[in-house]
């Protein structure tokens, strides 16, 4: 935030020493209903997300996204918690976490809260984290055959997105049990609910995935700026959403993606 001149605080608290406690990626079955869950400490760095075999195998969307986030210098220092709390509208991990239905663990002085992404991410640069609270963990349930993917177009390597799309599909008995679609940088809501509803419960097909991607693009509200016209961004968002959905489906089915 300070490097981007978005914040000039009077006081800065160094939370870096907490990285030892809050830097981890682990799989646990220790949940209330026994569903396996992936837990990521909020101070896990982009580089660790990029290099994680666990994420590459279980939630490939993270590996896809991390390959195109910033540059090695930023990835060596930046954390998933910082990225989610900055809540930049072009931020990639917010779309990733929305697509996979992540839950955010927020710790305060007296209590811990667990929020779903739509309750956590309140809009550009706004989250539900209060002044005396910290995001400490990100949790993602891993049930059934889950495939996920992330697609991004940027003007040059490591830049913020012109448009980006994340998709996650959970398949059971040949049908889409849960669909997650989230777009970045195109002024849409945190998740493309209308497109997700179109997919849920249906048998996946090319036509269905195309229709869902079109619906997701129709619900964007991009602005014309130095990264492109609103019309161009909406078009790119639709193309990327369709690509992400196709790759997510292939991965869920164990096919080459
Ligand atoms: C040149 C550059 C290019 C970038 N390109 C991309 C890109 O392509 N895609 C992308 O997604 N991101 C990009 N980023 C963002 C980057 O990836 C970092 O993730 C982001 O800046 C957060 O960094 P940080 O962890 O150091 O958090 P900070 O910058 O230190 O913090 C960000 C905000 O979150 C708060 N905060 C941090 N951690 C917590 C926590 N655990 N709980 C509560 N509040 C917290 C801080 O107080 C601050 O307000 C880029 C950044 C730079 C500087």
Image (spheres, grey):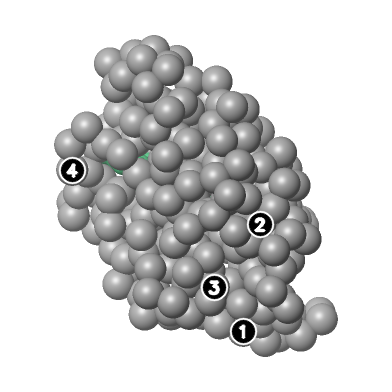
Q: Which quadrant would the C terminus be assigned to in this image?
A: bottom left
Answer with mark 2 or mark 4, whichever residue precedes in sequence.
4
> Which quarter of the rendered image does ligand 1 occupy?
top left
Q: Nearer the viewer, mark 4 or mark 3?
A: 3
Q: CA distance from mark 4 to mark 3?
A: 28 Å
Q: Which residue is mark 1?
A: 28
Front residue of 150/12: it is 150
Residue at the image position 22 percent from the left and 43 percent from the top: 158
**Relative horizontal placement of residue 62, taking residue 200 as reference (left or right):** left
Classed neighbour count for the residue bearing mark 4: other residues with Cα under 10 Å, few (<14), some (14–19), many (≥20):
few
Q: Which residue is mark 2?
A: 179
Whether residue 189 is visible to the viewer of this picture, yes or no, is yes
Q: Secondary structure at mark 1?
A: strand
Q: Which quadrant would the N terminus be assigned to in this image?
A: top left
Q: CA distance from mark 1 to mark 4?
A: 35 Å
Whether residue 123 is visible to the viewer of this picture, yes or no, is no
Vertical position of residue 41 compared to residue 74: above or below: below
Residue at the image position 42 percent from the left and 16 percent from the top: 230
On residue 157, which mark appears? 4
Residue at the image position 69 percent from the left and 53 percent from the top: 199
Q: Secondary structure at mark 4?
A: loop
Answer with mark 1 or mark 2, whichever residue precedes in sequence.
1
């Amino acid at each position: 935030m300070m490097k981007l001149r978005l914040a000039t605080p009077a006081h800065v608290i160094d939370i870096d020493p907490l990285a030892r406690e809050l830097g981890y990626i682990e799989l646990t079955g220790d949940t209330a209903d026994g569903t396996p869950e992936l837990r990521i400490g909020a101070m896990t760095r982009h580089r660790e997300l990029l290099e994680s075999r666990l994420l590459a195998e279980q939630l490939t969307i993270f590996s896809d996204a991390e390959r195109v986030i910033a540059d090695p210098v930023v990835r060596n220092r930046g954390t998933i918690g910082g990225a989610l709390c900055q809540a930049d509208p072009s931020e990639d991990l917010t779309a990733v976490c929305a697509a996979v239905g992540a839950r955010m663990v927020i710790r305060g002085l007296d209590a811990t809260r667990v929020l779903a992404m739509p309750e956590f991410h309140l809009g550009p640069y706004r989250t539900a984290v209060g002044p005396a609270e910290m995001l400490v963990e990100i949790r993602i349930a891993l049930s059934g055959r889950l495939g996920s993917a992330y697609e991004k177009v940027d003007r040059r390597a490591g830049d913020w997105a012109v448009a980006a799309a994340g998709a996650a599909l959970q398949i059971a008995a040949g049908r889409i049990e849960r669909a997650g679609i989230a777009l970045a940088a195109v002024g849409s809501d945190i998740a493309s609910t209308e497109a997700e509803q179109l997919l849920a419960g249906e048998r996946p097909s090319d036509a269905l995935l195309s229709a869902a991607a079109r619906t997701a693009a129709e619900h964007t509200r991009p602005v014309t700026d130095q990264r492109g016209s609103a019309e161009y961004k909406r078009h790119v968002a639709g193309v990327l959403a369709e690509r992400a959905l196709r790759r997510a489906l292939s991965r869920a089915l164990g096919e080459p993606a």
